[in-house]
Amino acid sequence: MEQDISSRQIAIYIHIPFCLTPCGYCTFFRIPYSKSSLEIYLQYLHKEIDLFLQYHPDLTYAKSIYFGGGTPSLLKAEEIEDICSYFIFDKETEITLEINPLQITENYLSALKNTPINRLSIGVQSMNNEELNLLDRKHKAEQIKDKIELCRQLGFNNISLDLIYGLPGSSINKLKDNLIQFLNLRPEHISCYLLTLDSDTPLADKIKERIVSPLPDDNLLAEEYELICSELEKARYEHYEISNFCLPGKQSKHNLSYWNSLPYLGLGASASGFLPPYRYTNPFNLNDYYSNLDKGLIMPEAEHCSSKQLIADFIMMGLRLTQGIDLNELKERFNYNLEKDKHLQLDNLYQLGMIEKNGSYLSLSSKALFVSNTVIGELI
């Protein structure tokens, strides 16, 4: 329901865990698709939304809505519309659908234009067919240009593309070619993710069994990250978060809520939410998810976060942004003085050139971005 609203209060994440075929590298919760399974799941998803809004009517006001997965583009347009109809939003509200390239068709996009979806996040991953095959992706690189053009023709003017780097057998030349092809498509947003593998994924098994090349070493990974940053910045993309780049004004509003430690509602099996001071994660097992909702339970096993946890989260998430964290905001929200409490660690990081200060903002230096976890770990 679109309205003029003065305050868009909360980011809303909706998880659709079903996939037609699993990708060999994926660590997200997903289950094989069947029409009947999805229908049952949606009934319970509606039940969960009803319960949340019954207990928390203020959660009706949406700052952003994000359909993630899994493969949320398995949803019909009317199913997306039904879910969005619970919430109140306006023309500034960002409503994103993750979409599989193979599901980008004229019929589906035309139907989506009748929904509130105004941003598409497309799982391209690579413009190299060998790499796509390695990742168990079913689309071909040569299809992507036509798919993006079709999105443009049908009025979608806010498109994000995913790129995965650090693949087995990767090289600087392969990545350079990938970046050229991504930039030729001129999406509004590009997310560049380092491949991380759990030990129980099919791709990890292939590496162990030497069916495919080993993962690149840390030196090559650092080179690849540096290349990504330099090429995208040369192409006038703003590097606003460790893994994310955008044209001016096209940051992911939804993800900014995560990075700025703002409230967000997680709906669906395995979805996580943050309603300060509570964090929760829904059950991964569908039967457990359904059983809780049958009992009228939401936010099962919600954790009441201590001030110490909230401060650590604020620092950890905020330092992912290239603008960094506002030390004044940290004091105002949590009555915490980082410069006083961590002065020895900060002095050391300044000397190493790992952090910078601009006014009240503390941020990672460009050379610290690739080793951000280590640097941030010093401050929490």
Image (spheres, rainbow, N blue to C red):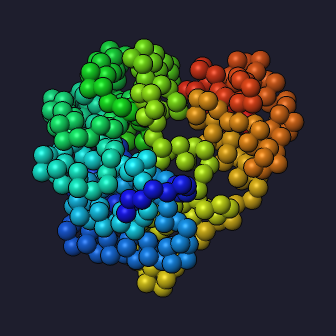
In the image, taking residue 217 as reference, residue 336 lies left or right, namely right
Give the image location of residue 353, x and y in percent. 70, 18
Give the image location of residue 242, x and y in percent. 53, 31
Q: What residue is drawn where x is 46% and y is 32%? A: 249
Name above or below for residue 70 compared with residue 208.
Answer: below
Name above or below for residue 190 compared with residue 312.
Answer: above
Residue 232 at least partly seen: yes
Name above or below for residue 182 compared with residue 106.
Answer: above
Q: What residue is drawn where x is 83% and y is 40%? A: 337
Nearest the viewer among 250 and 200 is 250
Residue 281 at least partly seen: no
Nearest the viewer among 104 and 82 is 82
> Which quadrant holds residue 214?
top left
> Which quadrant holds residue 126?
top left
Quarter the N terminus occupies:
bottom left
Count of marks overlaid on the render: 0
Q: What residue is drawn where x is 61% and y is 68%? A: 302
| Residue furthest bottom in the image | 295
In the image, taking residue 270 as reference, residue 163 lies left or right, namely left
Quarter the C terminus occupies:
top right
In the image, taking residue 225 as reference, residue 340 lies left or right, namely right
Give the image location of residue 35, x and y in percent. 19, 68
Nearest the viewer among 268 and 105 is 105
Q: What residue is drawn where x is 82% and y is 48%? A: 335
> Which quadrant holds residue 116?
bottom left
Give the image location of residue 350, x and y in percent. 76, 21
